[in-house]
Every structure is written in C-alpha cells, then in structure tokens.
C-alpha cells in the first residue's frame, strides 16, 4: 500500500472511532494482564463474563494467590483451556510478587517472562495499561494486514514488524484497536463485508464481497462450490456404532 493510502486508511478508521478501547474489562494493569492471558483462544465476551465477579474480589497478585488455583478455576471454568490458564495465572502472580513487588512491570522482556504471557499479550499490556505505541498482532490484525496489503507477512511477528514500519507515528497509539475492530466486525474471516467497508478503495484484496442480493453476488455464489464460505470443520474420524451386518449367503 502506498504511504499516502496508508494515511487515508488509518484516518478513516480514526474518524469512525476516535477513541477506541479494548473490549476486555479490567480495573488495573494486573487485571488487564489476567484478562488478556485468559482471552487466548477465547472470546472477549466469555472472558468478561467470567472476570466480572472475579475482579470484584481479586485485583492484585497477592489476592490471586490467596484465592488459590482451585478457587480461580471456579470462576474461569467456562473459558477454554482454563486448567492451564489457572496454573499460569498463579505462577505469574508468584513472579510478580517475588520479582516486581506485586506490580506489573512496564518492560517487554519482564512481561514475556510471565507464564502465559507472550509477545502479543505484552504488547496489549504495554499499549493499553501504559500508553505505549505498540501494535499487538492477533488473528484479526494478521488477516487485515495481509488481505489489505497494509502489512503482508507470513507470521504475526512479520506483520507486526511491517506495521511498525508503515504506520505513521500519529496513528501508532490506536492502530492496534482500529485494526482489531475492523477485522472483528467488517473484514471478518469467513466473508469480509467489503460492500460496507470504508477502506474498500484502498484495499488490495482481489475477491471483494459484493452487496447481498446484487447481480454480482448472485453470479459469484453460483460460480462457487457449495462448501465455499462455510466454516471449515475439523476432520474427525467417526467410529461406526454397530458392525456392518454379514452378507447373506
Ligand atoms: S475491502 Fe474487504 S477485504 Fe478489504 S479491508 Fe474491506 S472488508 Fe477487508
């Protein structure tokens, strides 16, 4: 994408949402770390539902250790991978108390040393809790970066580095949220809603989705195989419940 188009791209997203915020609920940097760690492979809504009662009684690493792993599991058992996540939250709480006086460090390396905290989580915490212009690349941003031509890359790290290079400083603070919201609600994975996308003319994606019910859309859906656009199903071997009957002689 040309630099002038990059500016237009961000400017339009900015005009639409001047003050974007994370959809995860938290009350301080520590609860943000916990919420982001719990959100891996889970929706923000499911995390918020679990953390709403949790954060009323636990908002420091010490209170988390006092609650204990079994107590934490009771709150987060509706979230995927909750056993592993509970273990990580406990271990991270112990490190925060032992090495950082119970505070969340404003330091990428220190954050990434916490169990359950990877580069993406560290970037979110640095950006949201400390106001640093980091760009965390999740599945939505990875997709938007590649589809649009804004920041193509084979891995989330590639896309992050590209975004770091092409994003003008004035947009860096909120780039992460603008791109996430765009990917979550417009440039969605299964079928991007190009017909109502405000950056459509700047986007390099070739197979843009036409408006529903339009002649183009009808032509397109006819030319597609029946399975196109459907979510991919995991390949599961289904065992036959009964043995096939023996052939009559
Ligand atoms: S035009 Fe389509 S593919 Fe491009 S950013 Fe918009 S929704 Fe995504």
Image: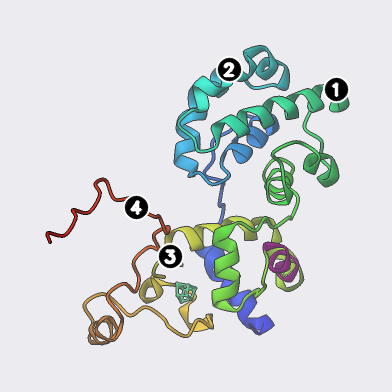
Q: How many angstroms separate mark 3 from mark 4 (CA)?
A: 36 Å
Look at the numbered disc 1 and give the secondary structure of its residue.
helix
Residue 175, placed above or below residue 52: below
Query: In terms of image quadrants, where is residue 11?
Result: bottom right
Residue 238: which numbered mark, if any?
Answer: 4
Q: Earlier in the sequence, mark 2 or mark 1?
A: 2
Depth check: 55 or 170 in front? Answer: 55
Q: Is residue 16 magenta?
A: no
Q: How many angstroms separate mark 2 from mark 1 (CA)?
A: 21 Å
Q: Kindly check if marks 4 and 2 are in contact, taking CB atoms under 8 A apart as contact.
A: no
Q: Relative to 174, is 200 on the left or the right?
A: left
Name the residue tied to disc 1: 98
Residue 57 rendering spot, x and y as whole percentages: 57, 16
Residue 114, placed above or below residue 153: above
Judge depth for marks 2 and 1 and give the one in front: 2
Judge depth for marks 3 and 1 and give the one in front: 1
Judge depth for marks 4 and 1 and give the one in front: 4
Q: Kindly check if marks 2 and 1 are in contact, taking CB atoms under 8 A apart as contact.
A: no
Q: Is disc 3 surrounded by few (<14), some (14 to 19) or many (20+) residues within 10 Å? A: some
Judge depth for marks 2 and 3 and give the one in front: 2
Q: How many angstroms separate mark 4 from mark 1 (CA)?
A: 49 Å
**Pointer 3 residue Cβ closer than 8 Å to ligand 1:** yes
Name the residue tied to disc 3: 186
Name the residue tied to disc 2: 70
Q: Which stretch did the figure color magenta?
A: 156-163
Residue 232 rendering spot, x and y as whole percentages: 40, 63
Q: Kindly check if marks 4 and 1 are in contact, taking CB atoms under 8 A apart as contact.
A: no
Quarter of the picture holding the C terminus: bottom left
Q: Is disc 2 surrounded by few (<14), some (14 to 19) or many (20+) residues within 10 Å? A: few
Q: How many angstroms separate mark 3 from mark 1 (CA)?
A: 44 Å
Q: How many angstroms separate mark 4 from mark 2 (CA)?
A: 35 Å
Residue 146 rendering spot, x and y as whole percentages: 59, 74
């Amino acid at each position: 994408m040309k630099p002038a188009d990059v500016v237009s791209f961000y400017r339009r997203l900015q005009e639409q949402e001047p003050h974007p915020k994370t959809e995860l609920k938290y009350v301080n940097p520590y609860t943000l770390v916990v919420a982001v760690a719990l959100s891996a492979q889970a929706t923000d809504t499911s995390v918020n539902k679990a953390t709403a009662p949790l954060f009323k009684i636990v908002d420091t690493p010490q209170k988390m250790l006092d609650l204990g792993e079994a107590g934490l599991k009771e709150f987060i058992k509706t979230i995927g991978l909750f056993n592993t996540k509970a273990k990580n939250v406990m271990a991270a709480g112990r490190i925060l108390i032992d090495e950082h006086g119970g505070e969340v460090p404003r330091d990428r390396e220190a954050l990434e040393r916490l169990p359950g905290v990877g580069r993406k989580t560290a970037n979110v915490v640095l950006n949201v809790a400390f106001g640093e212009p980091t760009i965390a690349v999740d599945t939505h941003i990875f997709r938007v970066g590649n589809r649009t031509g804004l920041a193509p890359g084979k891995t989330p790290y590639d896309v992050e580095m590209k975004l770091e290079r092409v994003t003008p400083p004035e947009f860096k603070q909120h780039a992460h949220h603008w791109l996430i919201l765009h990917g979550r609600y417009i440039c969605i994975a299964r079928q991007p809603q190009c017909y109502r996308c405000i950056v459509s003319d700047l986007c390099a994606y070739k197979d843009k989705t036409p408006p529903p019910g339009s002649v183009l859309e009808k032509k397109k859906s006819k030319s597609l195989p029946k399975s196109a656009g459907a979510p991919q199903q995991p390949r599961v071997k289904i065992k036959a419940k009964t043995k096939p009957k023996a052939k009559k002689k």
